[in-house]
Image (cartoon, helix red, strand yellow):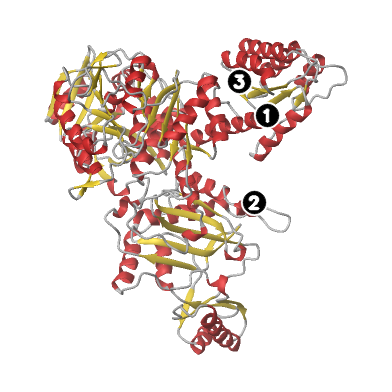
Amino acid sequence: MSTVYLERLFRPRSVAVVGANNRPQKVGYVIMRNLLAAGFEGPVMPVNPRYEAVAGVLTYPDVASLPRAPDLAVLCTPAETIPGLVDELGARGTRAAVVVARGLGATSGGRSLQDRALEAARAHRMRLLGGATLGVIVPGIGLDASFSRIKVRPGTLGFVSQSDTMGTLILDWAAPRRVGFSHFVSLGDAADIGFGEVLDYLGSDPDTRAILLYIESLRERRTFMAAARGAARNKPVLAVKAGRRPPGSGSGVAPSADTLSLVEPDAVFDAALRRAGILRVHDLEELFGAVETLATARPPRGDRLAVVSNGGGAGVMAADALHDGGLRLQPPSEATAARLRAALPPGAAVANPLDVDVAAPGSRYGEVLSILLEGGEYDAVLAVHTATALASSTEAARAVIQAAKEKGGQVLTCWAGGETLAPARRLLVDAGLATFATPIDAARAFRFAVSQRRAHEALIQTPPSVPDEFRPDPAAARRVVEGAMADGRDWLRAPERASLFAAYGLPAVETRAAATPAEAARAAREMGFPVELSARSPDIRRKREVGGVALALEAEEEVEAAARTLTARLSRLRPDARLTGFALQRVPPRRHARALFVGAAVDPFFGPVVLFGEGAEAAPFRDVAVGLPPLNLPLARQLVGRSRVAALLEASPSRPAVDLDALCLALVKVSQLLADLPEVVEVDVDPLLADADGVLVVDAFVRVARPGPEGADRLAIRPYPRALEEAARLRDGREVLLRPIRPEDEPAHHEFMTSLSPADSHFRFFHYVRSMPHSELARLTQVDYDREMAFVATLRDAPGREATAGVVRTVTDPDNDVAEFALVVRSDMKRQGLGTRLLEKMIAWCRSRGTRQMSGDVLADNEPMLRLAQRFGGFQLSPGPDPGIVRITYRL
């Protein structure tokens, strides 16, 4: 269903309140009066056959009697009336409705009221908010279509909540602090409009500076992830998630009871939010601090904070809270310290946190803050003041306000105390400074701001290319998997695992299988000693945890005896397990190796996830970090860094550091395996040995299953579509590679953009672009393949070096109706047929996705592009939105 009509929800020109009421205890009463009190300038049309007027406004008996089709309808009637009202309003031309009623899950005629309402809405391309919604508020246009009794100030924060209680709590908290909102949206049941749709809207809304989410459940992972990543590139997005396990099942594959058991369910949700660039806060205290920071403070340039207080204890509290979040307070430089000593009483210690003395007058606060803000050594300053009879709190607040105003730095404040400090706090709030109740709250808020900045930087980073030598062979891997399934097995045997890993360049120890203890002894003699022996069983994933492995066997008789011992032990400990024989390995000596765990499993909602942590020797105390595929090298490095084992990978006096690049590449390979083979539903490599010489798979388990209807689309984030790569030959005989753009193309894309002639740059961007910042180049090269596509034409201009010769780009609306496109070819590569070839490829791609049309705006004097459109055929030319612009459209 179209998101175009969300404009009717958030910026309606007229509103009808169906079920408007004059009885104060009714929802229709509160909503009607909120609309009138908020100052909505369009017509408000109450509908209720029992009243001649509601709140003094002429009332209509039914929808048919309305003098015009309202842009927005607020439905305050019982649940059983909703499907009929939606159909009636949609037929009249209404395109958005707020459904307050609860109980739409009730069935009538074998179908739920919700399903009937959605069917009616789809028939008329109408969008529904709710049911069970508190409503929607857009203070900037005077729209309060809610039954909240709290007046909401205009501001720059968008707040989206599934909980009425949480929404009311946030609004109540914000009112006395003068925190305003651009939009307040209560999703309620989210039967139609959910987080993804609202994120799409708010992410591109110029009046919204930051977005807050209160999440109880999600219904569609791809829509949410695509919208969240798009919004988070533009502005801060933070979320509170209620509940420990995300409900729903989008994978079609039952979760692994074994590998996923290593992970707290909430950790997967954490990983998804992190990958989307959303910062998660875990409780109301953190949320309030985050709101305060977003509403009043600019994002800090870095993580250097100076703390100034009139009491040592308060400063230490802030320092401890920063330390808990991994931040440190750095002392001032000697030059800054000398200036501070001159401003402080004789003998005062100069440190960070800085104690200006319990009797410090306001002037001292102002002077100290000015020195710290001028020095450039700190990204923000936190001024803490506790009530004292020796100095004026109000005077100190005024001095801090003046210093912040004059020096222009980032200033956070905490006037900690009771009602005696209320006037001073009011001055700080009125001055627009972020103000917190305690030093701990202030420190947490600064940690949040730093984390948010880092999350945004991670989202727009330019990853290095995966090494050229990593050339997976998905076809060979698929033959292995299909062979096992054709054999009626949902698990791979040791030789099959070896072939699967070889297809993805994962080095593994040679493994031989033996059916009996005697056969194991003979195989050991042929391999050479020492050997490791393990029991083979599809029912035991981690044999070391149940004593199913014997190490350092030096003779045939030791191998045979160990095999009999393992059989007896496992028969006693795991009588349910099928024992299919033994596996022998001759593991090369790697004295400094760390035993690690690398896994993959299918989460019931977010789909495949990659797991990393300590090997089975650390059980039951090991921790496991979670990442969403597809992974690149920086994402893999972050995954490793989030695990507790990360510290053990570094160098120590007794052993060298692990080859971190090789370890991260192994994680990327496992991620690629998941992307290529939807049949693989579980990978359990334990142990993976890692040292300075690289990595080595010692033992593993792989489970397979017939893919569900989603197939390759089971990933929450669409991976790089390698299948779309193809070669093309230019008119002069040179060969170019046409392929989707990749994040690591940023350097080549920068060269491409700077190589354009002023005329070509003007035609592409409607003005001359000399250079682009990293953030813009990252946006152009890090596309979400679910929503947009850019095909680049690359050619080798030097050994091992690719240059970009042209690019065609489309951005498709969330409903897949219209793809806005742009095309540019390098100035020295024209008249080679490259523009036509790129355009053909993009048209084929859009057709394959079912997109309705491609459209683009072209400057009227861009004769080369207009000639290309005319030669190509099928393009319709029409006047554009502004003079001097031609709109070209291709129906697909």
Residue type, mark 1 in image? Pro
Q: How far apart are marks 3 and 1 (CA)?
A: 16 Å
Q: Which amino acid, mark 2?
A: Ala
Mark sitting earlier along the chain (2/1): 1
* Disc 2, SS: helix
The residue carrying pointer 2 sits among few (fewer than 14), some (14 to 19) or many (20 or more) residues within 10 Å by Cα, namely few
Q: Nearer the viewer, mark 3 or mark 2?
A: 3
135 relative to 673, above or below: above
Q: Is residue 518 left or right of residue 251?
A: right
- Which quadrant of the figure has residue 11? top left
Q: Is mark 3 on a helix, strand or loop?
A: loop
Residue 785 in the image: x percent, y percent? 33, 41
- Res. 410 mark: 3
- Crowd around label 1: few <14 · some 14–19 · many ≥20 (10 Å): many
| Residue at numbered disc 1 | 439
In front: 612, or 750? Answer: 612
In the shown orientation, is residue 391 left or right of residue 689? right
Residue of label 2: 647
Give whichever of 806, 410 is nearer the camera: 410
860 relative to 315 in the view: left or right:
left
Q: Which mark is residue 180?
A: none
Quadrant housing residue 364: top right
Instruction: Judge left or right: residue 589 versus residue 242.
Output: right
Q: Which of 378 and 556 is in front in this view?
A: 378
Camera-nearest label, 2 or 1:
1
Q: In this view, does 143 lie above or below 723?
A: above
**Quadrant that contains the C terminus:** top left
